[in-house]
């Protein structure tokens, strides 16, 4: 886990064949809305970790 977290933090993509891949993606700044009072708020840009499921993993989960 530490190796994955460290490398994704450095901007590298980690692929575990058949399982999935981990990578960091940039999310643009945007305007959101406070659900309590409806006021507009600015949400800053940031980098988020993303996991994409591999084909074999997805197939096995959806097997009927």
Image (cartoon, rainbow, N blue to C red):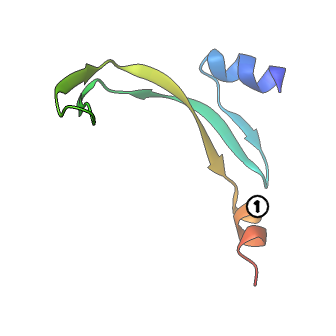
Relative horizontal placement of residue 43, taking residue 52 as reference (left or right): left
Residue at horizontal 64 percent and vertical 17 percent from the top: 9
Relative horizontal placement of residue 33, taking residue 64 as reference (left or right): left
Q: Position of residue 30 (x, y in %)?
A: 25, 28
Which quadrant does the N terminus fall into? top right
Q: Of 30 and 24, which appears nearest the observer?
A: 30
Q: Position of residue 19 (x, y in %)?
A: 78, 52
Q: Residues within 10 Å of mark 1 (few under 14, many from 20)?
A: few
Q: Position of residue 35 (x, y in %)?
A: 27, 36
Q: Secondary structure at mark 1?
A: helix
The residue at the far bottom in this view is: 64
Relative horizontal placement of residue 18, taking residue 42 as reference (left or right): right
How many numbered discs, if any?
Answer: 1
- Which residue, given by chain and number where applicable, does mark 1 sit on? 57
Q: Of 29 and 26, which appears nearest the observer?
A: 29
Which quadrant does the C terminus fall into? bottom right
The residue at the far left in this view is: 39
Q: For residue 45, which quarter of the picture? A: top left
Q: For residue 39, which quarter of the picture? A: top left
Residue at horizontal 76 percent and vertical 61 percent from the top: 57
Residue at horizontal 48 percent and vertical 22 percent from the top: 47
Q: Is residue 23 above or below residue 56?
A: above
Residue at horizontal 17 percent and vertical 27 percent from the top: 40
């Amino acid at each position: 886990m530490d190796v994955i977290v460290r490398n994704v933090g450095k901007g590298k993509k980690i692929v575990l064949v058949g399982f999935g891949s981990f990578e960091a993606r940039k999310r643009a700044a945007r305007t959101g809305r406070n659900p309590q009072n409806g006021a507009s708020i600015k949400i800053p840009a940031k980098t988020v970790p993303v996991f994409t499921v591999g084909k074999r993993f997805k197939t096995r989960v959806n097997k009927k």
